Image (cartoon, grey):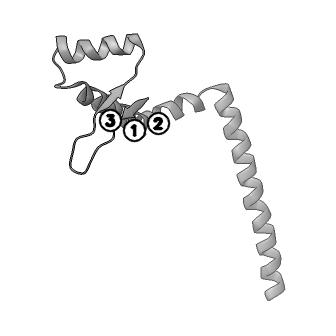
Amino acid sequence: MAEKAPATRGERVAISYKMPPNIYDKVNKLVYEEKKFSTVSDCITQALLAFVDNHHDMGQFRELFKDYMSSDEGRELMKNMMKEVLLDVLSHQKIDAKDAKGNS
């Protein structure tokens, strides 16, 4: 978790990050050895942005959905959903047909 130091108006807020040792090592390596980021905050911000982008990527969602639907579990789910939709559509058509006859 990040801890915020109290700030007055117009001042920067200092944040200290508590992270597991393996993450700390990776972040330090990226910032100080490989110099891929100018600051630790920049590194963490970019990582969060990449995480959000990757988890909201529709292309990735489509691929994962295709994989799921090609599985036995996915096919079974789709069969059940289609049965429910067909029953719903057909039951409404019967009601609509009765209404049409009654209104004539």
Q: Position of residue 30 (x, y in %)?
A: 23, 16
Q: Are marks 1 and 3 in contact (CB under 8 Å)?
A: no
- Whether residue 14 sits left or right of residue 67 in the image: it is left
Residue 45 versus residue 91 in the image, above or below: above
- CA–CA distance between discs 2 and 3? 17 Å
For the image, the number of numbered tags is 3
Who's the residue at 36% across and 25% down the image? 17
Q: Which quarter of the figure has residue 57?
A: top left
List the residue tagged with mark 3.
49
Q: Secondary structure at mark 2?
A: helix
Q: Residue 94 versus residue 30: which sits nearer the camera?
A: 30
- CA–CA distance between discs 1 and 2? 6 Å
Q: Secondary structure at mark 1?
A: loop
Of labels 2 and 3, the one closer to you? 3
Residue 93 versus residue 85 in the image, above or below: below
List the residue tagged with mark 2.
61
Quadrant for the C terminus in the image: bottom right
Instruction: Name the N-terminal-most of marks 2 and 3.
Output: 3
- Whether residue 54 sits left or right of residue 14 in the image: it is right
- CA–CA distance between discs 1 and 3? 12 Å
* Picture disc at residue 57: 1
- Whether residue 17 sits left or right of residue 81 in the image: it is left
Q: Are marks 1 and 2 in contact (CB under 8 Å)?
A: yes
Instruction: Name the N-terminal-most of marks 1 and 3.
Output: 3
Q: Position of residue 69 (x, y in %)?
A: 59, 32
Who's the residue at 62% across and 26% down the image? 71
**How many residues crowd around disc 3 within 10 Å: few (fewer than 14), some, or many (20 or more)?**
few
